[in-house]
Image: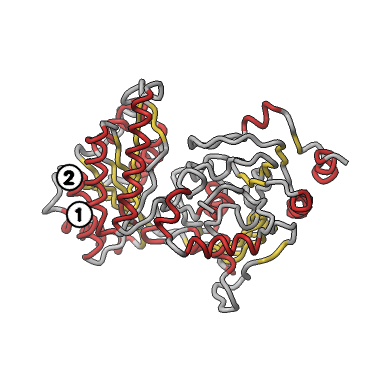
């Protein structure tokens, strides 16, 4: 029996070999490309298991995929084979407020999960800029996080148990419903960040926490981004842990104001400090931030209320897509955008990015998660200019190597995929050989998402 007939026996008409459909799965938001042979859309864990068993027997590559908005080629099928589109597995299966947890399928969108939790007064803290588009499965596969991880931690801090279909189709559970366990190897964390190279997540049991009573947003602007980085270090050193701490450099602010002329933001390189908790605690934290930052800041403002805060955060989420408002001839290219360093090295990284940008004449915006050492870099060029493309690649390479030298990661939340695989040896050293050994143990035929993570 042909492969496609076998697959139709498992999922019915939810399998396609159409060229037009396959093209839709041949890339993500990165520059990485790869054409699948088949697209399969399972709706149940049992279907995923059967598909993997069939692929394992025939040595067919399988690349799992959510909404396909990754920035490193992680869901791109480099070796052809099957793309496993999990976006249809999007049910919230259990909400257990009395156990502080939920059970969700991998295709659930985080924003939808939080909408379902809000009436109970709870939320799932990881909050990427793509929270209205990405999926829980993709978030776990890359250990994504977003703006709240300064206080609340990354996705790995909220995963209690995973149901995973292994390469041969066997289905396992990696954890339990317990908030803590010391029973053997932490297989849950092994799967988190593995980008579909060790198994396919089919269900996730997630920890949830109560919504904060109130929030305040302090906006402090500075003469330059390096001074802004110094202010962040001083804030943290004084004992203040904001729920979010984001940088918007002056170029980013110009872009956002062109998108929305009514948006009110101070001039200069801006830090957004969000604090949450009780009314008394948030007011006290906001006052402390103002006091700590005032010697360095050129201006400090506090958002007038919830509506203004929501407008500012909504604008922040649009940064990546709005660069064309500054120069319609240029396009933002997602390379070199996710490097991370220890918090005290942030000013040095900001300075190095500026030096690299000026030397290679590649414009760069700096925005994002400065509070956890992960300020994003937006490089933008005229994609029709071959010389600019060459300089763009060189700039991204220098940013990655600067991050490794400063102590270090080439990806803090967007994943390694194919785009950053060549840096894994420099970052991990001999530990990369251990990763390869784990890969061979769980996927001896190397069918799961081949060509990723520098493996």
- Which image quadrant: the N terminus? top right
Label disc, if present, on residue 231 of the rendered structure: 1
Q: Position of residue 149 (x, y in %)?
A: 40, 57
Q: Residue at x 65, y 51 (%)?
A: 448
Q: In the image shown, does 336 or 312 lie closer to the viewer? A: 336
Residue 41's quadrant in the figure? top right
Cβ atoms under marks 2 and 1 closer than 8 Å: yes
Label disc, if present, on residue 222 of the rendered structure: 2
Category of crowding for the residue at label 1, using alpha-carbon neighbours closer than 10 angstroms: few (below 14), some (14–19), many (at least 20): many
> Whole-Å distance between the Cαs marked 2 and 1?
9 Å
Q: Secondary structure at mark 1?
A: helix
- Which image quadrant: the C terminus? bottom right
Q: Residue 314: tell me if it is visible.
A: yes
Q: In the image shown, does 177 or 35 lie closer to the viewer? A: 35
Q: Secondary structure at mark 2?
A: strand
Label disc, if present, on residue 157 of the rendered structure: none
Q: Residue at x 61, y 65 (%)?
A: 161
């Amino acid at each position: 029996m042909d492969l496609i007939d076998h697959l139709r026996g498992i999922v019915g008409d939810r399998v396609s070999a159409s060229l037009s459909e396959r093209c839709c799965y041949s890339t993500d938001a990165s520059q990485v490309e790869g054409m699948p042979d088949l697209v399969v859309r399972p709706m149940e864990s049992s279907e995923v298991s059967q598909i993997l068993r069939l692929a394992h027997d025939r040595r067919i590559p399988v690349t799992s995929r959510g909404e396909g908005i990754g920035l490193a080629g992680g869901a791109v099928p480099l070796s052809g084979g099957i793309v496993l589109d999990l976006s249809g597995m999007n049910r919230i299966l259990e909400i257990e407020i009395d156990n502080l947890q939920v059970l969700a399928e991998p295709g659930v969108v985080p924003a939808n999960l939080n909408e379902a939790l809000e009436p109970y007064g709870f939320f799932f803290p990881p909050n990427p800029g793509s929270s209205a588009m990405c999926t829980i499965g993709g978030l776990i596969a890359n250990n994504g996080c977003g703006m709240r991880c300064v206080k609340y931690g990354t996705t790995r801090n909220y995963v209690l148990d995973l149901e995973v279909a292994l390469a041969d189709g066997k289905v396992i559970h990696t954890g339990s419903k317990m908030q803590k366990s010391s029973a053997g190897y932490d297989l849950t964390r092994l799967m988190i960040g593995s980008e579909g190279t060790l198994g396919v997540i089919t269900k996730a049991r997630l920890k949830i926490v109560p919504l904060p009573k109130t929030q305040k947003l302090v906006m402090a602007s500075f003469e330059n981004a390096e001074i802004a980085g110094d202010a962040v270090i001083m804030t943290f050193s004084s004992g203040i842990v904001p729920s979010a701490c984001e940088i918007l450099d002056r170029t980013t602010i110009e872009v956002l104001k062109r998108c929305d002329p009514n948006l009110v933001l101070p001039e200069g390189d801006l830090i957004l400090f969000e604090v949450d908790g009780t009314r008394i605690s948030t007011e006290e934290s906001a006052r402390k931030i103002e006091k700590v930052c005032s010697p360095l800041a050129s201006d400090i403002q506090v958002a007038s209320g919830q509506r203004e805060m929501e407008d500012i955060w909504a604008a922040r989420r649009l940064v990546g897509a709005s660069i064309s408002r500054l120069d319609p001839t240029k396009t933002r290219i997602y390379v070199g955008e996710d490097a991370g360093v220890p918090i005290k090295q942030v000013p040095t990284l900001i300075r190095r990015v500026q030096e690299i940008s000026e030397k290679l004449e590649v414009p760069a915006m700096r925005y994002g998660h400065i509070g956890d050492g992960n300020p994003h870099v937006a490089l933008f060029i005229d994609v029709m200019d071959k010389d600019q493309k060459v300089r763009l690649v060189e700039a991204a390479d220098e940013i990655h190597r600067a991050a490794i030298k400063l102590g270090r990661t080439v990806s803090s939340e967007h994943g390694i995929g194919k785009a950053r695989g060549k840096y894994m040896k420099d970052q991990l050293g001999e530990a990369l050989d251990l990763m390869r050994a784990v890969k061979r143990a769980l996927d001896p035929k190397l069918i799961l998402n081949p060509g990723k993570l520098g493996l």
